[in-house]
Image (spheres, grey):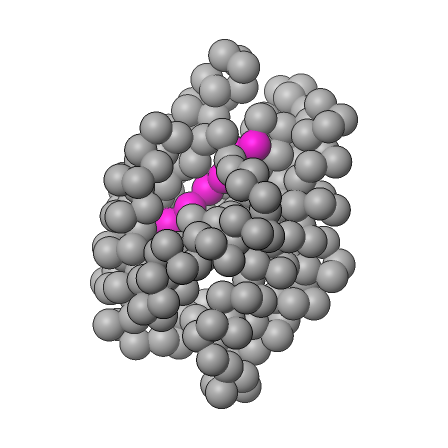
Amino acid sequence: MFITFEGPDGSGKTTVSKAVMERLVNEGYPCRYTREPGGSEIAEQIRDVILDPKNTAMDARTEALLYAASRRQHLVEIILPALENGIHVISDRFIDSSLAYQGCGRNIGIEEVYRINEFAIESYMPEHTIYLSVSAEEGLKRIQDRKFLDRLDQESIEFHHRVWEGYQKVVSRYQDRMIVIDAERPVEEVIEEAYQKVKGLLDGH
């Protein structure tokens, strides 16, 4: 199965998805953890360009295209080979992030960004998505403690509000595969609920 974790900055995606992955592996589930942008050597190089705080001149459509390029490489080099070998893939972000961040955060439009990504992933979508729900204000408050804030972390509160609104549209659009979890609770509770949901999906596969 291909399962993704999504949510605004500060929702705890990385912490929660890694914790869930670790528990599943310890219990013998064949799983691979990966992330976006990045995941493979070429995709990680594109990630560095996208998130470098010095790249303030980057055009919004350039950003969207770079994310799609990174995603394409990630898909063909990491995700599909793992699935073909009977390994479940858990990814920290995938296409939904682009729809929310570039489609709404950058005001390009969800449909426009989807079309860019449709070419990149050939309509290959995750089977299930764990969406960690957190407000823009709470998310930004949490990331202030990070030692390094990338180019998108440093965007305005207005940008992050648009991203949050974008995610609401994405969750509604793909509600058949979305599992929404309240991520404003203590992280231990969020990890436990996410683990139970993912384990249930794998057991029922």
The answer, for residue 168, to whether it is visible in the render is yes
Q: Quadrant of the C terminus?
A: top right
Placement of 9 over or under 201, stated as above or below: below
The answer, for residue 12, to whether it is visible in the render is no
Q: Position of residue 189 (x, y in %)?
A: 34, 34
- At 34% across and 62% down in the image, what residue appears? 109
Residue 44: image quadrant is bottom right
Is the magenta region chiefly helix, strand or loop?
A: strand
Identify the magenta region: 2-8
- At 70% across and 67% down in the image, what residue appears? 45
Q: Position of residue 78 (x, y in %)?
A: 71, 43
Residue 47: image quadrant is bottom right
Q: Position of residue 91 (x, y in %)?
A: 56, 42
Please state if 22 lies on the left or on the right of 12 as rendered.
Answer: right
Q: Nearer the viewer, residue 177 or 108?
A: 108
Placement of 26 over or under 50, stated as above or below: above
Q: Is residue 7 magenta?
A: yes
Please state if 114 lies on the left or on the right of 178 as rendered.
Answer: right
Q: Position of residue 33 (x, y in %)?
A: 63, 40
Please state if 58 lies on the left or on the right of 120 as rendered.
Answer: left
Please state if 147 lies on the left or on the right of 100 as rendered.
Answer: right
- At 41% across and 36% down in the image, what residue appears? 130
Q: Nearer the viewer, residue 151 or 71?
A: 71
Q: Quadrant of the N terminus?
A: top right
All told, the count of numbered labels is 0
- At 47% across and 80% down in the image, what residue appears? 59
